[in-house]
């Protein structure tokens, strides 16, 4: 017997078949095989571009901007390190200069107090060493700037010789020497009243000439002033090392 279905002769009429009216089973997504998952995901992405295209575009633009600004950022970090290193070096140099300046002040104070001192000792040394036997010093005054000597002798030549010796002193400015108040008095020679020699009184003044350490040391050695020699040697050693002990 031949199966015949007359509905096949008509267009537009859906032929019913057994089992076709069943709804397709809802198969879980994760139970699909890998190939089906790729197909489903691809279809979802194609149909729903609105969900990811704006976000990806924003992220892409941000990444490009960050990539463009990354090199300047690295340069900024490098320059910042250089700046910090420079600042540290400047601070160290400032501290070093301040310490050096303080040490120089200490050295200068030490020199003025212990080395240079008042010129009285050296002046007295020269005066004692160069006084003629027949000349008498009645008074002398000295300060840091200059001196005054009051002397008397029975001979002008003796006074002139004494003045000439003063001109050769290294501690005196030779062009500043002045002689005034030359007074001739009567015979006051108590040892020989019958002498006809007159006594000459004279005042000699001048300016001091500051001498360096190299010229002071021989004077102190010659006068056996070992205390002052020790101070000068300590100053020289301190100046070389930069430390005052």
Image (cartoon, rainbow, N blue to C red):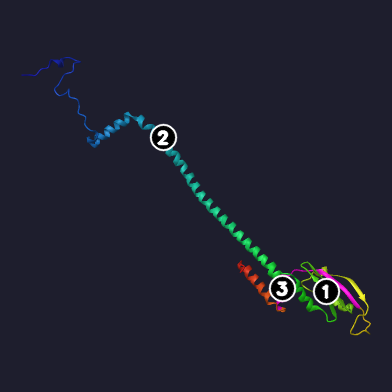
Q: Is residue 195 left or right of residue 123?
A: right
Within 10 Å of disc 1 (Cα), the crowding (few <14, some 14-19, many 20+) is few
CA distance separating discs 1 and 3: 25 Å
Left or right position of 238 against 193? left
Q: Which SS class for mark 3?
A: helix
Tell me which residue sits at (81%, 73%) in the image.
140
Residue matched to label 1 = 139
Q: Is residue 126 left or right of residue 83?
A: right
Judged from this view, the residue extending furthest toward the left is 1
Question: Upstream in the sequence, badge 3 or badge 2?
Answer: 2
Q: Of 11 and 140, which appears nearest the observer? A: 140
Q: Position of residue 31 (x, y in %)?
A: 22, 35
> Crowding near pointer 3: few (<14 within 10 Å), some, many (20+)?
some
**What residue is at 51 percent from the left and 51 percent from the top?**
81
Q: Quadrant of the C terminus?
A: bottom right
Quarter where residue 172 is shown? bottom right
Q: Quadrant of residue 167?
A: bottom right
Numbered disc in front, either 2 or 1: 1
Residue 213 falls inside the magenta stretch: yes
Mark 3 vs mark 2, CA separation in Å: 87 Å
The percent coordinates of residue 113 (x first, y second) are 69, 68
Query: Which one is in front, 161 or 42?
Result: 161
The answer to whether residue 66 is above or below residue 232 is: above
Front residue of 4/120: it is: 120
Residue ID for mark 3: 216
The answer to whether residue 159 is above or below residue 16 is: below
Mark closer to the chain start, 1 or 3: 1
């Amino acid at each position: 017997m031949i199966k015949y279905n007359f509905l096949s002769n008509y267009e537009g009429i859906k032929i019913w078949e057994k089992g076709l009216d069943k709804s397709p089973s809802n198969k879980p997504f994760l139970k699909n095989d890998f190939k089906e998952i790729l197909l489903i995901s691809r279809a979802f992405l194609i149909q729903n571009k609105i969900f990811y295209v704006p976000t990806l575009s924003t992220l892409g633009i941000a990444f490009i901007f960050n990539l463009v600004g990354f090199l300047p950022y690295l340069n900024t970090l490098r320059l910042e390190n250089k700046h910090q290193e420079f600042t540290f070096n400047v601070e160290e140099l400032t501290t070093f200069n301040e310490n050096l300046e303080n040490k120089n002040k200490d050295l200068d104070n030490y020199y003025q107090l212990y080395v240079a001192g008042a010129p009285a000792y050296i002046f007295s040394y020269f005066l004692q060493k160069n006084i003629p036997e027949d000349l008498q010093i009645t008074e002398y005054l000295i300060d840091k700037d200059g001196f005054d000597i009051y002397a008397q002798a029975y001979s002008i030549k003796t006074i002139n010789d004494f003045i000439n010796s003063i001109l050769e002193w290294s501690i005196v400015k030779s062009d500043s020497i002045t002689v005034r108040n030359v007074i001739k008095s009567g015979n006051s020679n108590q040892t020989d009243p019958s002498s006809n020699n007159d006594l000459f009184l004279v005042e000699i003044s001048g300016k001091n000439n500051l001498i360096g350490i190299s010229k002071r040391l021989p004077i102190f050695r010659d006068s056996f002033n070992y205390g002052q020699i020790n101070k000068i040697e300590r100053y020289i050693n301190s100046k070389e090392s930069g430390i005052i002990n």
